[in-house]
Amino acid sequence: MTAIIGNISLIFAALISFYQFLNIRNINKIRFLNPDRAISLQFFFVLLSFFSLMFAYIVSDFSILNVYQNSHSAKPLLYKITGVWGNHEGSMLLWVLVLVFFGFLISKFDRRLDMPYKTLTLSFQSLITFIFLLFILLTSNPFILISPVPLNGQDLNPLLQDPGLAFHPPNLYIGYVGLSIIFSFTIARFYKGSFDSAWAKLIKPWVLLSWSFLTLGISLGSWWAYYELGWGGFWFWDPVENASLMPWLCATALLHSTLVLEKRNALKKWTVFLAFLSFSFSLIGTFLVRSGIITSVHAFASDPTRGVFILMICAFFIFSSFILLTKKASSIKEEKLITPISKEGSIVFNNLLMVALLLTIFTGTVYPIFLEIFTGEQISVGPPYFNLTTTLIMGPAILVMSFAPMLNWKKDDFFGLLSRLKTMLFLSLLVAFIFFYINSQGPIVAVVGIFLASWLFFGTIINFFERTNYLKKFKNLNKSFLGMTIAHLGVAIFIAGVTGSTLWKVEKIKTLKVGEKVLLNNYSLNFDKIKKIRGKNYIGHEAEFNIYKKNKFIKTLKPQKRFYPVQEFPTTEAAIYSRGFSDIYIAMSEPIDNSWLFRFHFSPLTPWIWIGSIMAFIGGILSFSNRMFKGK
Amino acid sequence: MKYITLIIVTAFIFICLFFGLNKKDKTLNSPLLNKPIPEINLVSLKNEKLNETDFKKEILLVNFFASWCVPCIVEHDFLFELKKQKPIKIYGINYKDDIENLEIWLEKLGNPYSKIGIDKTGITGINWGVNGIPESFLIDKNGIIKHKINGVINEKQIKILLTKIESLEK
């Protein structure tokens, strides 16, 4: 019954979305199924289908193949619910749910749009929905039944049995798929209106919203990997991580070029191009993750027809948008030239760097695939390539990012700028020197990283004080400006976090018996106890470490090693003590007789990675709400 | 014009991705495939020699493992399973491990290996192009590498191994 409801809802949603796209030319006639109602119905049906699947998971209905393959009756309720999107079919359904949700949001809440333009946008959004629903129905239907009904399920991959799965994918998808609405807005604009600053004002909040959630989703994923995978890092340049970083870079560039279009009515074609590129990379990301073309932690069991289908979807949208751009590019009039020393000049500079980084990462991600096709050789482009190129490209970008908000639009004075940078330079050199003094053994690159972080931090703070006239004008402060300030400060803190975490990390791997201890950067970690634990669907061991600094007790940490019998899969639950300025991290491995193998990390500044990311998210949301609800 | 270039480049990328998707064999192919085994000169756990001559007598499976390697524990049962289905010799190469730990490990989990070479420095691992353990090589009676498995040998891998062994026996 559940399966039937789920399936029929999907078919209805597909039919309505197709109808809405077909009626693109009759947009002015109000019919029985007017655009707002049609989009609401699509949302309703996809939601119904989604809840049907969730219901099947909650009651452990193993007559549905998808539930049988990814659930187990002994699984805790939270993971039964999150398990809905812990597999290919369910996560595609979530994808489409977010897709129609965005259409719904626009139809219901965006009062700034005029009717014909809104209708046209929703029609294009419906086309995307239709194609993805077709994909689900034809290749990835989550409601396929099996008979005879198995007694119990195969359980969910234990790595995914974590609260992280509740938050990471939905947030990431809001960001990823949110870019689809920007795409629809852009395509529709070719047929109604022109690319001017009014258009930039319309799309800006939606770009901000997608960007913010993309930021949040990526950082949640990275945090999850940090404590669940037990490797002690926050970013591994895994192809799937790259797949989410690429749209983020694109969206970041788009966010800033939209600003130029809004304020200066310039960079029209570039903004349109970036809008297309952002959605293209969100599709390519989906392809890379879903087709199984690359092996990674995120890749689910794949079936080649799915890959071909998604590739066709990608090709369809990317080519039609590029061809549209080719044909209509001449109708977009660029009037203004941009001078290098100006706010828009600096934005263009950083835009180019973002796109350069995007292409570098894209190359690194697909190069192994290409090489294998042409030579049959198999290689892996690992962190050495990505770390080097990213640092080289991001360095100059951060330098400029610091003072770009201080510059005037149109034209600024080069020497005037230099004199304003003196204080910043002094303060950042001071901070870099202090860090160097504290930890002089560390690599010199780390000092550069800290310098860049403080350069950006002080630049943003100084600009904030100048613009608010040293907080006298704080009350009538523009919320978008506040949002930008918070986000840029977040980036500064993030960079410091990355620097500390990658370059100053101290790692020890040791086998210990109960009663032994290990010394880690002035801390004594005493291995005092080990006990057996038993969860709802796992068994395992928990170690107890008491941490002392100079004989003063600080905290108890309890890392775990779990084993999930149904999937025959062990997991590591790292224990982390976050002190604001650093993390102490313990991950345990298998026992060998009476000893246990542990991995200890002392990671300075690591918590800042997530503090910074959350600040960027808050900044983005602040700016979004200001534009959406108060702005014109 | 520049848009045309863009479209051509994109089309090229898509064609490549399409072919990438249709790769027949998705397992990692070692450049050592169908070549004689690389240099190996180890001392075994029982203090015997283990070198190339040991590999040229019969079909065998060489399995790189270590007691610190968690997936190897998972794999261990499947090695016994394989031996149950097909009595084949398995040589273990103990990679960068502590001998004491290894002995405890074997005592606890059982020993499916006919011989265990101790690769304390990891040199043999490098010679054999091992990326990460467990990794296993199927070797024919002439000492030629016929198949390589990256990661854990599981049920599916056992099936593949059995068909490969069968074809080698013909």
Image (spheres, coloured by chain):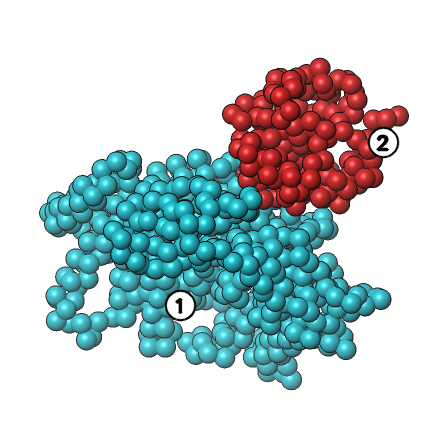
Chain colours: A cyan, B red
The local secondary structure at tag 2 comes to: helix
Quadrant of res A132: bottom right
Q: Could you tell whether A97 is left or right of B160 in the image?
A: left
Discs 1/2, front: 2
> Which residue does the image show at 60% across and 72% down from the upper left?
A77
Tell me, for residue A205, which label it has, or none: 1
* Relative height, residue B27 to residue A126 (above, below): above
> Which residue does the image show at 88% across and 25% down from the upper left?
B170
Kind of residue at badge 2: Glu
Query: Looking at this rendering, what residue extends furthest in the top direction?
Result: B53
* Relative height, residue A4 to residue B14 (above, below): below
Query: Looking at this rendering, what residue extends furthest in the bottom direction?
Result: A32
Q: Chain of mark 2?
A: B
Q: Which residue is mark 2?
A: B166
* Relative height, residue A385 to residue A239 (above, below): above
Label 1, residues with CA under 10 Å away: few <14, some 14-19, many ≥20: many
> Which residue does the image show at 22% across and 48% down from the upper left?
A455
Quadrant of res A555: bottom left
User: Mark 1 and mark 2: span between their CA atoms?
Assistant: 64 Å
Tell me, for residue A148, which label it has, or none: none
Q: Could you tell whether A238 is left or right of A311 in the image?
A: left
Give how far across and how far down residue A502 sits, in percent.
36, 43
Instruction: Tell which of B168 and A396 is nearer to you.
Output: B168
